[in-house]
């Protein structure tokens, strides 16, 4: 283009065709061509698609295959290589190179129509979006990968986070109940992903678990599920998951009690609300106050986030959940049907009167586990002291107690175990073990000694010594006035 510009400049100076050709060392025909041209506007570029190609006769076939792919799973569709191989198989005279096929397939996929996304408009208190994420935490001293329930409110951009060991309906319901009663109200609608643990999609319908159906009825929620493979339909909570992970779970939180940690996470989540909304220019906390003002009132009673399941125990009174997790009930319930109350954090076998026999921490994961509560075996072992050495109870007491009872005569062993059992009934297993440990330290393991020490510890938790005993504590116990 610079040469053409020089030709036009020399023409304007009055140079002849021959002089211009000699000056620029080009043919005179070239000079005349550009001198006669009057429009130098840029022409419309010719695209590759406009040029003839050897692939043109086969393009309708390729388009048909790619269109059919839209009806199939995204992991089972034509690649460019598969298109090329099929063309060679079905058209014996096919003589087009693979790069040509690959370019066309890539071009067609880029040009394919997409659904796109729309910016949604949310009213205050209209809905909350719910999803799960994963993050590492330090539990006790071990790094553990946990799941966290994220609940976001699209109008205000507020969100809450709760940690769990799984992604089942009990976890969802527990987290939502705790959040709802913390904020004191409920939105009209909950929006879930297709795989949020609350239901299973069957064709166009979703079959919700019973515990979640009861939860939704309890609070009167309208439930919306996203379409399959369409997580963008709840993109607000998808962004909130990442935000919560980066701001609430960095550095890795240290957990000793998951329930207490979740309780602290509720106000901790609200500490992030002082930021300004990315679009509305107001603090998230102010926008959420508007939402809270129009939330629906909660029912008089909180929903109990449990499901009940009937199991059958084995000869040791144990039962199995999820195919690999075993829990103890009590020996007297061996080989019997048993009702179990299952929550997000706990598993409780219930007696015939409906009261829990014990409470186990719920175990998650694919590996087999065995959870034993020694409190449920203490009476049985006290009745049969010969089973002491091989009982699970022996493994649940401190080393000093184990050594002392191993060396005790049968009668003394039975008396000590009976004292342990009776203290358990009155003050709990942990308290009874401490009383027995104190009795062993004092060298007084008779039944009356253990029960007396347990009673003293219940009145005054300070450790006993072999020194002077303050009898005023017994006056309080007997209802007498102190001197």
Image (cartoon, rainbow, N blue to C red):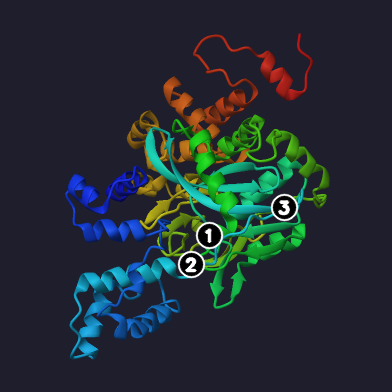
Cα separation, mark 2 vs mark 1, equals 46 Å
Q: Are marks 2 and 1 in contact (CB under 8 Å)?
A: no
Residue under the image location 42 percent in, 33 percent down: 140
Q: Is residue 318 above or below residue 249?
A: below
Query: In this rendering, which labeled residue sits more in front, label 2 or label 3?
Result: 3
Q: Is residue 146 left or right of residue 300?
A: left
Q: Which residue is mark 2?
A: 335
Q: Secondary structure at mark 3?
A: loop
Q: Are marks 2 and 3 in contact (CB under 8 Å)?
A: no
Query: Measured from the top left, where is residue 77 in percent x and y?
Result: 35, 75
Query: Measured from the top left, where is residue 398 in percent x and y?
Result: 40, 32
Q: Is residue 397 above or below residue 383?
A: above
Q: Is residue 216 above or below residue 396?
A: below
Quadrant of the rendered image containing residue 112: bottom left
Image quarter where the C terminus lies is top right
Query: How many other residues sit within 10 Å of disc 2, few (<14), some (14-19) or many (≥20)?
Result: some
Cα separation, mark 2 vs mark 3, equals 55 Å
Q: Secondary structure at mark 1?
A: helix
Q: Is residue 161 visible?
A: yes
Residue under the image location 37 percent in, 60 percent down: 37
Q: Is residue 357 visible?
A: no
Q: Which residue is mark 3?
A: 122
Query: In this rendering, which labeled residue sits more in front, label 2 or label 1?
Result: 1
Between 49 and 237, which is closer to the camera in this rendering?
Answer: 49
Between 221 and 424, which is closer to the camera in this rendering?
Answer: 221
Residue under the image location 24 percent in, 84 percent down: 87
Cα separation, mark 1 vs mark 3, equals 18 Å
Between 148 and 407, which is closer to the camera in this rendering?
Answer: 148
Q: Which residue is mark 1?
A: 231
């Amino acid at each position: 283009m610079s040469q053409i510009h020089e030709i036009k400049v020399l023409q304007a100076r009055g140079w002849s065709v021959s002089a211009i050709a000699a000056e620029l060392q080009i043919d005179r025909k070239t000079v005349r061509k550009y001198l006669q041209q009057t429009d130098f506007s840029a022409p419309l570029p010719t695209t590759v698609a406009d040029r003839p190609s050897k692939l043109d006769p086969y393009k309708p076939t390729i388009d048909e295959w790619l269109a059919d792919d839209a009806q199939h799973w995204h992991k089972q569709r034509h690649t460019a290589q598969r298109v090329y191989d099929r063309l060679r198989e079905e058209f014996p005279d096919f003589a087009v190179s693979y790069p040509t096929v690959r370019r066309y397939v890539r071009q067609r996929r880029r040009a394919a129509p997409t659904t796109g996304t729309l910016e949604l408009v949310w009213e205050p208190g209209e809905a909350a979006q719910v999803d799960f994420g994963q993050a590492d935490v330090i539990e006790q001293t071990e790094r553990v990968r946990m799941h966290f329930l994220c609940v976001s409110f699209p109008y205000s951009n507020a969100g809450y986070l709760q940690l769990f060991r799984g992604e089942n309906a009990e976890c969802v319901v527990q987290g939502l109940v705790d959040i709802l009663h913390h904020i004191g109200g409920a939105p009209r609608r909950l929006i879930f992903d297709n795989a949020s643990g609350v239901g299973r999609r069957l064709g166009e319908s979703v079959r919700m678990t019973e515990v979640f159906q009861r939860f939704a009825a309890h609070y009167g929620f309208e439930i919306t599920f996203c379409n399959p493979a369409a997580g963008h339909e709840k993109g607000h909570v998808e962004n909130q998951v990442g935000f919560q992970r980066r701001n609430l779970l960095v550095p890795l939180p240290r957990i000793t009690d998951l329930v207490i940690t979740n309780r602290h996470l509720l106000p901790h989540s609200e500490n992030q609300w002082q930021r300004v909304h990315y679009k509305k220019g107001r603090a998230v906390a102010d926008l959420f106050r508007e939402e809270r003002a129009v939330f629906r009132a909660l029912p008089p009673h909180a929903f109990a986030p449990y499901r009940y399941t009937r199991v059958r125990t084995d000869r040791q009174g144990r039962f199995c959940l999820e195919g690999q997790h075993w829990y103890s009930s009590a020996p007297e319930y061996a080989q019997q049907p048993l009702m179990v109350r299952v929550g997000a954090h706990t598993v409780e076998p219930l007696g015939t009167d409906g009261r829990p026999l014990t409470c186990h921490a719920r175990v998650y994961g694919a590996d087999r586990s065995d959870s034993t509560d020694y409190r449920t075996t203490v009476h049985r072992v006290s009745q049969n002291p010969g089973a002491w050495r091989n009982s699970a109870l022996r493994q649940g007491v401190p080393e000093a107690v184990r050594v002392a009872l191993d060396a005790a005569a049968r009668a003394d062993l039975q008396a000590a175990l009976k004292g342990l059992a009776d203290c358990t009934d009155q003050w709990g297993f942990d308290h009874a073990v401490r009383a027995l440990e104190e009795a062993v330290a004092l060298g007084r393991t008779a039944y009356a000694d253990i029960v007396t020490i347990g009673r003293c510890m219940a009145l005054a938790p300070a450790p006993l010594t072999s020194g002077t005993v303050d009898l005023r504590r017994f006056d309080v116990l007997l209802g007498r006035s102190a001197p």
